[in-house]
Image: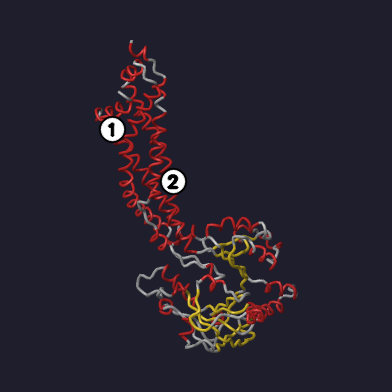
Amino acid sequence: MNYLKRAWLSVTRRKGKSLLLFVIIFILSNVIAGAVSIQQATQNVEKSIKSKMGAAATVRLDYENMKESDYENIEELSKDTITKVGELSYVKYYDYVMTGYMGSESLKAYVPELLEEQGGMTSGDDMSAYYTYGLRGVQSDKIVPLEEGTITIVEGRSFTVDEVANGKAVTLMSKELAELNQIKAGDTATFVNAVFDYENNEIKSKTEYPLEVVGIYQSTASKDKKSAKSSDSANSDDWNKAYQEQMEANQIYVPNKLVEETRRENMTSYLDANSDMTETDLEESISVGEPLYLLKNPEDLEKFKQDAKALLPQHYIVFASSDDYDNIAGPVKSMSKIAGYVLIAAISASVMVITLVVLLFLRDRKHELGIYLSLGEAKAKVVMQTLIEVFIIALVAISLSVFSGNIMAKGISDTLIQNQIQQQDQMGGGITYYGLSELNSDTTLDDVVEEYEVSLTPSYVALMYGIGLGTVLVATIIPTTYVVRLNPKRIMM
């Protein structure tokens, strides 16, 4: 009788021992399957959310890791450095963007319904009214958000090369702001740049900027997005999304040179008040905007960061739109870490428990194994028979646990996420980067949780079988050394 048939008969005839081993492997496999399911789900949601966040990056000072003494030796970011980073192979488009603010005494700012019911924006001669409209400068006629499709021109046109190069008084306005003020492409909208005397808390001077609205744009994300609605249970996520919507709608695109002009007006007041500041310092403070890099592939982000770091002055880092994922998805990341620890513990426990059980079974069958060996059966075949017996039982147990463990993971992960959310409510809102709009993420913890899904995927099934059968193999090989050491003559005496 060959060892394959003996293995099958051993499993079917020793029903009690087979059932005991099946129950042990099934229970341990469920724990492993649950941990694997949770880790697979967290990896999938991280990949999906980061992809939605986009592959936009900029360069900024590493404020978190800088000491007070470091601020005295900061090297300014030059246009040459911005260009060198932009020429890296990972970059699809790049630009350097000057940002600023202006107000208006004739236009009405767009305010979402939720914020309007909570007080809306200030107006009149209040200083904050002159920070209502965000200026988003461009250095090229190829506007990155337009090229990427994050905004589209719905009326009029984009900037020409001449308009950008010469800093003409032209602008692109959002559809929401244009409709609110009944502005069409070709109309002129007047904005005001105010210079403040902060010591006396008053306005020193005002300069009007009549800008021709050459085009009206719409954010592709806002086409299907409705303003946040007011309710008694309005939470921080609603407020953050409404605030982000307001900032985007009140942002106007203008040539960099126009932003530079407004900055020069504002910085002049600092020059007058600060005797230590020279004309050269003034020019350096306004000559370079914030760089914006759009990568070809979000997966190249880490490589881009490493290569760009070598080109940057000390204390500068690459900041990407997806860097805030860990802050937003804190509860999900914590759950993934817990699942990782459980997986390691479950595999270790499985190896120890299955090893002890198989070893006990082999000791009970010592006489049977001695007969096989005394009849001339090779020790390798006796070992193979033991492996096959355990694998037959393990294959059935693991196959069932693939489904039951996945179902168990769904219930456990939902409970864990809710507990983590209650402990980390402050992380529930979206993260806003106060700079380029392309780097602002309106992704919230709710979005991450909504994207999170424990599902039965081919990769999960393959990984589960690999881990499960691999664990059983290791746990079975260890006690089979007992068979190799058996002496049939001593057993039969």
| Residue 347 percent coordinates (x, y) | 41, 38
> Image quarter for residue 272?
bottom right
- Tell me the number on the disc at residue 437: none
Which amino acid type corresponds to the residue marked 2 in the rendered image? Gly
Q: Is residue 378 above or below residue 114?
A: above
Q: Is residue 325 above or below residue 147?
A: above
- Tell me the number on the disc at residue 20: 1
| Residue 94 percent coordinates (x, y) | 60, 68
| Residue 475 percent coordinates (x, y) | 40, 32
- Between residue 233 and residue 93, name the one nearer to us: 93
Which residue occupies 32% across, 36% down?
A: 24
Which amino acid type corresponds to the residue marked 1 in the rendered image? Leu
- Between residue 384 and residue 437, name the one nearer to us: 384
Quarter of the image where the N terminus is located? top left
- Tell me the number on the disc at residue 340: 2
For label 1, the SS is helix
How many numbered marks appear? Answer: 2
| Residue 242 percent coordinates (x, y) | 44, 73
> Image quarter for residue 7?
top left
For label 2, the SS is helix
Between the residue at mark 2 and the residue at mark 1, the CA separation in whole angstroms equals: 28 Å
Mark 2 or 1: the one toward you: 1
